[in-house]
Amino acid sequence: MAATPDLEAFRAEARAWLDESFPKSLAGKGATLLRAEFIEPEGDLAIWARNLGEKGWGTPTWPAEYGGGGLSQLEAQVLAQEMNRAGAFNPLTTMAGMGITMVGPTILEYGTEAQKRMHIPRICKAELFWALGYSEPNAGSDLASLQCRAVDAGDHWVVNGQKTWTSGADRAGWIGVLVRTDPDAPKRDGISFLMMDMDQRGIETRPIQLIGGASPFCETFFNDARAEKDQMLGELNAGWTVGKRLLQHERQSQTGTAGMGGGSKKSLVDRAKEYVGVDERDRIADPDLRSRVVAHMMDAKAHSLTLKRVVAEAKGNAKVSAAASILKNAASKVAQARAELDIELMGHSGLGWEPEGFEEREVAAVRAWLTGKAMSIYGGSYEIQNNIIAKNILGLPENTQRG
Amino acid sequence: MAALTEEQALLQEQAKAWAREEAPVAKFREMRDSGNEFGFDKATWESIGEMGWAGIVVPETHGGVDMGFLTFGVVLEELGRQLTASPLIASGLVGASALALGGDDAQKEAWLPHIADGSVVATLAVDEGPRHAPDQISLSAQKTDAGWRLDGRKTHVLEGMAADLYVVAARADGELALFLVEADTKGLGRARLNTLDSRGYASLTLEGVELGDAARLGEGDGAPLLDAILDRARAGLAAEMLGTACQSFDLTLDYLKNRVQFGQVIGSFQALGHRAAELFTEMEMARSCVEAALQALDEGSDDVARLCSLSKAKAGAFLHLMSNELIQIHGGIGMTDEFDAGFYLKRARAQEATFGNQAFHRERYANLLGF
């Protein structure tokens, strides 16, 4: 990036603001503080979240008139560099649930002026957690066959049905839901996108316990639940387009492999050396394991270089690129391979479920390995991404199973 | 594709158009059918010389244009797509790098302007056995009163039949040393290696080759110099390989969209669509590695060695897979000599083996990073 006088002035401004607003006690602690189960920030973290939200810099490139930072892509890059330098991090993305990563960008694109004024400022401050109701028990990869119904009751919509895999629904304040509004239309043409207040008797949630032990997802039940008339995002029966666009934002946010380290700060290579030992030249002692670790490290590097390249090529253009599907598949492959190697290299020590008899990081690695199996399933499975690549990027004719 | 400068983008267009019109695969086929012992068409090489491509990494003070490695990579990728055969890599990349990195002023002045305009073909003679093993060089260099005496053998020398100048890696008193040996030097013999890819490799025999002191390239231990030359060679070759692989992918994708069986184009079958999607993903990953290595060379960053090994290994792995899929997905037609797929497969294996195959570079990457 060329250093221009304007950008350098902004850098100084960002640095000064961070110096004043970011509590030093939090420096470098982002990874440990921002766990998936994290709900309400306390102490310095609460102060930082409030400062960042009020400044709008948790959503740096969103329009300032709705509470965003109003920064250019280049300024946002400078801000990210300065935050990195100060050891600062963005807690709002986690606190807002799907609000900042997915719902917000889609409201900004498809929402009415009133919807933007109502929702975006609250998302920018992460005042509440946003959930998304997409999948249903009988609508997974074939999402367009969803059956949750919304019926026009004059001054509002009445919603009945069930959603599943709704992340964080048990602590969500609002939820975006794909509902069927025209049961007679072809399946993709009778779907609408409704935004609903979770604080009502008609919506109940039940956490789903996963193989890794945690319950990040819920089943969500709608029994004569109410959605206001002005809370439809996009046109009536145009929800498939809106919903797909939102998924592109989701994919974009799932292109990295971060958070799959399994609770250890040490690299995979160091852990391999620790558990299987080293040879006389300080190499991983088991040659077969070593060669697979090496191949994996090279795959991981290729993936991270691709992430960097996509950013460089976008040259500040924030458009969601088709490369997101490629990156998501590559990310899940790399992350899952790393988790598998991590478990394997620990041998018997990689079988712990609770810390009793095991080290905490060993158990964490096991849990992360199991949790990571979801990476190639959620947000459109590995196979669905391949359908999208084949059809949308490569221009191959539609498969008989529509993606 | 990396964010290119206007100049790079223009050169890319020029190279693409030139390769497609003046040096396409059909031209390579003609060259092969003619039994040309040099493995490239002289007129094609002259055109490349006139366009200045052999001087892309040669300093301006020595007759080049000094446009850097990413720029060179852009050209090599386009030539790789059409399997254009020429000494551009052997001479314009490797030979030029050897002199630019190791040469003294007199050596640079004597050779670089001629390498840059294509009138001299220089090449590196490094390998001695069936595998690339630059740390096991045994060709002997002995100090004499007048200079040096070289004895030994080299093999898999790129453009070895056409070269005017060899950069010979030798062992002098235990240490590695590089020497400039002109093709007509007494005691130097060369023999053609008739390889599957129809290029002009040679083996060399050096028997009592007498050289003056001025023939020595660089001073002291020559191993770091050889490494630096080889890294440039690997990154540039990886760019050419990427081009060869991308064209193989494009040919395959085109076939998937046009070949009809069971009443529909075969690209509509999910089994094939998913294979294409996975190949495309691998291709993007390989491209990132190739471009990162070229950019690292341009920036002189300290991770050059590991990125060059990464790029050669990843470009090699993708090309290996892609060249096999090119044949498999084309089915019977892919097996015929009349169709071009075989040329791509044969070129792929030769490129993979040159300057270290995938296994070599995985091992080197691991050693560089202390795995």
Image (cartoon, coloured by chain):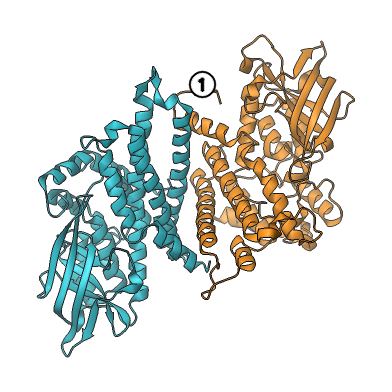
Chain colours: A orange, B cyan
x 47%, y 30%: residue: B271
**Residue at the outermost top position:** A184
Residue A398: x %, y % from top left: 48, 23
Q: Please state which of residues A85 and B32 is positioned toward the viewer in this rendering.
A: B32
Q: Dot 1 lies on which element?
A: loop
Q: Toward which corner of the image does residue B70 lie, by quadrant?
A: bottom left
Residue at image coords 45%, 26%: B269
Where, quadrant-wise, is the N terminus of chain B in this rendering?
top left
The location of residue A48, given as percent across then percent down, is 79, 53
Residue A6 percent coordinates (x, y): 58, 53
Q: Residue at x 63, y 32 (%)?
A: A247
Residue B263 picture quarter: top left
Q: Is residue B58 visible?
A: no
A14 or B187: nearer the viewer: B187
Q: Is residue B93 visible?
A: yes
B359 vs A290, left or right, is left
Q: x and y percent of residue A259 in the render?
A: 67, 51
User: Which residue lies most toward the right here?
Assistant: A201
Q: Amino acid at mark 1?
A: Thr
Frontmost residue, B88 versus A285? A285
Task: Look at the picture and state if B140 lies above or below A75.
Answer: below
Q: Residue furthest front?
A: A348
- Which chain is home to disc 1? A
- Height in image: B227 above or below B216? above
State the residue position of label 1: A400
With respect to residue B213, does B367 lie above or below?
above
